[in-house]
């Protein structure tokens, strides 16, 4: 019989990593946008 708890925890861990990766990418893009905006004003 499959170990559903193990499967669930593995999936949950992967989803959490994916969400953190997306958040990190979004924050990086926001930083680039802010830096570019400041550069144009100077």
Image (tube, rainbow, N blue to C red):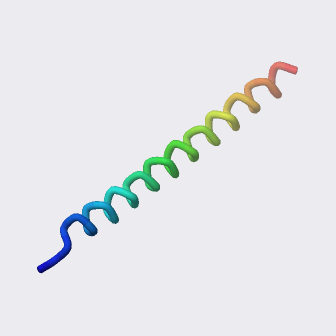
Task: Give the percent coordinates (x, y) of residue 29.
Answer: 62, 40
Q: Residue at x 67, y 33 (%)?
A: 33
Q: Is residue 1 above or below residue 29?
A: below
Q: Residue furthest top?
A: 41
Q: Residue at x 19, y 68 (%)?
A: 4
Along the line of sight, which residue is nearer the eye, 34 or 4? 4
Task: Give the percent coordinates (x, y) of residue 7.
Answer: 26, 68
- Is residue 34 toward the left or the right of residue 2 in the image? right
Q: Residue at x 41, y 52 (%)?
A: 16
Q: Residue furthest right?
A: 42
Numbered-mark total: 0
- Is residue 25 toward the left or the right of residue 15 in the image? right
State which quarter of the image contains the C terminus: top right
- Is residue 13 toward the left or the right of residue 35 in the image? left
Q: Residue furthest left?
A: 1
Q: Which picture quadrant has residue 6?
A: bottom left
- Is residue 25 toward the left or the right of residue 19 in the image? right
Task: Give the percent coordinates (x, y) of residue 23.
Answer: 51, 42
Q: Residue furthest bottom?
A: 1
Along the line of sight, which residue is nearer the eye, 32 or 18? 18
Q: Which picture quadrant has residue 30?
A: top right
Q: Which picture quadrant has residue 38?
A: top right
Along the line of sight, which residue is nearer the eye, 14 or 31? 14
State which quarter of the image contains the N terminus: bottom left
Along the line of sight, which residue is nearer the eye, 27 or 32? 27
């Amino acid at each position: 019989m499959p170990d559903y708890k193990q499967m669930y925890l593995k999936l949950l861990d992967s989803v959490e990593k994916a969400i953190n990766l997306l958040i990190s990418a979004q924050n990086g893009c926001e930083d680039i946008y802010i830096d570019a905006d400041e550069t144009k004003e100077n």
